[in-house]
Image (cartoon, grey):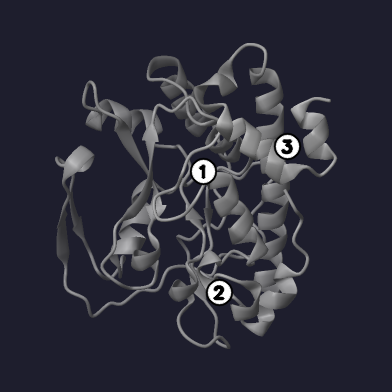
Amino acid sequence: MSLLERYRDGDYIRVWEELRALGEKARDPDIIEDANAVAAATMKRAAANFVRIERELRAGGYRFGWSIEPTLPKISLHTSGPLKDLRFRLDSERVGSLSHMIATMLRQHSSIGPDLERRGPADREDHQVFSPMNDAAVEQLERFEAEAGPVPLSLYHFWREVGGVDFMGQAANWDGSVGSGDPVVLNPPDQLMDAYEDEAVEGQPFSYILGPDADSKGGYSGSVADVLLPDSRADFQLPGYDWFVDYLRQSTRLAGFPGFGIADNLPPDLKAIAAAWLPF
């Protein structure tokens, strides 16, 4: 029985454990077709979860968008490491937090694809919950793989199926801040090859920013969640979390807010949403 057949039969956990155990051998000719099929099937189910969660959050009154704090002064950001030459000057009337800057820096502003549509009016003019892949983003991803090397199969198929997702927002009837729940924010690859050409150092891994980390989303001085590329494996570990597929599982099992840890900690509105989770 193939890995895909086992996966479709519900053996989700063990199939991914075996793919990870293969390391770079997941791309061997005798396994790569099966591994790609599993990754594609996984991300279709993950996407179905995200679409349902977004729809139900919106129906429950959740307001998607990043908060704006117009009283903050203008700030300059100076980065180090792979982004050492990058300089930003931010107008606080448009961007009210470091985490918003990080996400905005790489967020896809594209036409909406056929599988993930914008559902309902945006709560902020510049906010897009889903950033499906357009031609430019596909070109960035394909050029990177052709010229720099592979992207982990899990991330490649997440990008192809979902693109990017941003669940930051406001909820009037929750205790504490939305940011403390670590809402999912994952950027698409719309800047991948451009960033590689600008920032890559020969002989060193290239760091691509996937989004702000949990501290930044919670309103604290934080950093970013990134992926080191190229990477030939089937899956990779997201800094501060676990394997990427497991992170997506945890995020969707907790209605888009993995920071709550377990279902018992979810606000009542989210418990009902989480109960309809589609396993993958």
Counting from the top left corner in percent of width and height, residue 31 is at 66, 18
Instruction: Please name the amino acid that badge 2 sits on.
Output: Arg
State the SS at label 2: strand
Task: Find numbered disc 3 in the image and state the secondary structure of the residue it sits on.
Answer: helix
User: Residue flagged by tag 3: what amino acid is it?
Assistant: Ala
Return the disc, 3 or 1, that comes first in the chain's sequence. Answer: 3
Q: Earlier in the sequence, mark 2 or mark 1?
A: 2
Callout 2–callout 3 Cβ contact below 8 Å: no
- Residue type of the residue flagged with mark 1: Ser
SS class, disc 1: loop
Could you give the CA–CA distance between mark 3 and mark 1, rounded to whole angstroms? 24 Å
In the image: residue 20, left or right of residue 211: right
Q: Position of residue 264 (x, y in %)?
A: 64, 79
The residue where tag 1 is placed is: 110
Look at discs 2 and 1 and give the one toward the viewer. 2
Q: First in sequence: mark 2 or mark 3?
A: 3
**C-alpha distance separating marks 2 and 1:** 21 Å
Disc 3 marks which residue? 41
Q: At 29% from the left edge and 63% from the top edge, which residue is drawn?
A: 222
Crowdedness of circle 1 by 10 Å Cα count: few (<14), some, many (20+)?
Answer: some
Left or right, 179 with reference to 159: left
